[in-house]
Amino acid sequence: MLKINNLTATVDAGRKTILDGLSLEVPAGEVHAIMGPNGAGKSTLSYVLTGREGYDVTKGSVDYLGEDLLDMDPEERAAKGLFLSFQYPLEIPGVPTMTFLKTALNAQRKARGEDDMGAPEFLKKSKAVAAELKMKADMLKRPLNVGFSGGEKKRMEIYQMMMLAPKFLIMDETDSGLDVDALRVVADGVNALRSPDRGMLVITHYQRLLDYIVPDKVHVLAGGKIAATGEADFAKTLEKEGYDAYV
Amino acid sequence: MTLMSSRTQSKPSNLTEAETELGFNLPSRRDEAWKWTDVRGAVHATARGLTRAGRPKFLLPDDLTVEEIIRDDLETDTPMAALARNFGDKVWEINVPDNYKGVIPVEIDGFESGHVRIRLILGKGATLSLIENHSGENGFSNIDVTIILKSGATLDRVIMHGDGDTQTRTLTTHVTQWGGSVFNQHTLSFGGALARLETRIAGMSKAIKSHVHGAYLLSGKRHTDMTSYIDLTAPDAVIRQSVKGVVTDTARGVFQGKFHVRRPAQHTDAEMRHDALMLSDRAEIRSKPELEIYADDVACAHGNTLGALDEQALFYMQQRGIPKDEARRLLTEAFVVDVFDDMKDEVLRESMRTKIRTWLEVNG
């Protein structure tokens, strides 16, 4: 589903190489975790995949559902089902959450040649998702993420993810800022989205999240490339032994 | 304060053609208060209404009337007021009785060109909404408005402004507020060749409240100047001012705000903000926030920012599937509209939002 081949990316106008020949394949239906030390390039990978400005791909390719992902605008990638749950979700003052998400959903549908989702259907769906995530109703009326706690922002990411029902999910440090109860709620939401035609990339610092979202593969990202790969229990070994062997 | 000034000034040597027609020195960049808004350079001798009285149109509820009063005196020493007196023929005066409860707003338009003097007096405890539409083409409009709010009166004023790019406009408002009166003003301006919307408030007695909010959205070579001077002479005033600007192309926005807190004006609580967004590198913002404070027990603050849209927020929106142009429009709209959040009239507020959205669809 997602094939990353020998990807090299730089920042600061080519002065600094962050990803250095990274290759990784996530087939549909699988959840892959990426772990690694600070500064290994985990967030950079998520930004390069979603098309953020400021990162230059100097080598390699990314094939997503048979298309050249790197050739698309960020919004095009989103419409094709790529979703990033941000490590630090942005506050958007003045734009109510519901307005924001309805605009996003219908922009994606338009790009895919589908009809707009009407207000009644949208509200119904939103209510159901909010209930599933145990979210307070007033969170959806407020401007997006404004004044939310770290945990609330992460929950809002999952809410958006469930509303947009993307095909490929990238979760960047989704567990940071969440207490155990919230973590369980979020993980339940993510697990409910697991399906044979969906792929997920879970980026995390800690093994804790992977107790709840059990991955098919665990990769170590170090030195800008995948340094090692293992099964789900590899995460526990990494947590115990650290990344020293890979840097 | 009544100030009699002579009708003819001593003539400087190099008058513009328009100034010769007017027999009057127009404010220019040599005057400190007008340094960014050069009326002298903008007004052409051929401008419609240059030396004529304007014909405002009043839409009034049945129980209010406009009187046409000939008077020669001036209540202010501002230059444009003197010019309005010289060519405005008369004063259009509305007297709102004590304790009048305005349900239907007073609407004024017809400010296409010429000189106009308006006087609005709200009696004690009266409430009124005032809506003004200022627009014109190929002309010069010089509107001088005097507003007197007696104790306990409340005025909600909305100014909509959008001129053709050949129109020059000065709108000067002098507000006198007596004890406990409330003045709420919301201005939305899309500019013109040159426009100065100036509001001068004198707080004469205790516990006045003034909200002087506005937004300007300017494209092309348009120019709007929002200048205000709030002069407080008595305790317990509450002043809120938030002006938002959006400029693109080579447009120019000017904000000049001054709070003058005199020694007796203790416990003044005043906040001034001007925030501007530049959608183009060639657009211009000029800003001068000033606080002059002589009372020692006050809370006065001012803030002034100038920036571009937040690239991170734009990327976040794009990642959710919102095309970049639409994301820019949404963020810009959100940035501007909050100055209208406290408008009581929901329909009016929504119509301002629609105007902003329409502007953004063309220019955002």
Image (cartoon, coloured by chain):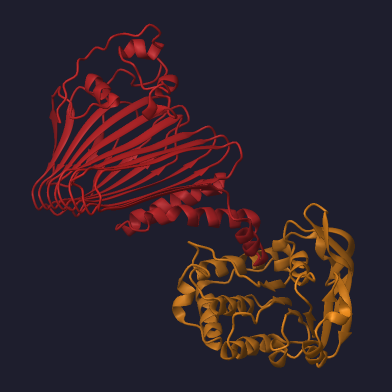
Chain colours: A orange, B red
Q: Is residue A185 left or right of residue B258?
A: right
Figure check: B25 above or below A113: above
Name the residue nearer the viewer: B260 or B73. B260
Task: Tell me where residue B258 appears, x and y as whole percent.
Answer: 33, 40
Residue A27 appearing in the image? no
The residue depicted at 83 percent of the width and 90 percent of the height is A234
Quadrant assignment for the N terminus of chain B: top left
Quarter of the image holding residue A101?
bottom right
Q: Is residue A96 above or below residue B7?
A: below
Labels in figure, total: 0
Does A40 sit left or right of A129 as displayed?
right
Give the percent coordinates (x, y) of residue B218: 49, 40
Front in this rendered view, residue A167 or A220? A220
The image quadrant that residue A245 belongs to is bottom right
Q: Position of residue A87 (x, y in %)?
A: 66, 73
Q: Is residue A160 left or right of residue A245?
A: left
Q: Residue at x 69, y 87 (%)?
A: A209
Residue extending farthest to the top is B13
Q: Position of residue A159 (x, y in %)?
A: 58, 79
Q: Hey, which residue is sitting farthest left in the picture?
A: B98
Question: Foreground residue, B58 or A39?
Answer: A39
Q: Height in image: B243 above or below A169?
A: above
Q: Is residue B42 visible?
A: yes
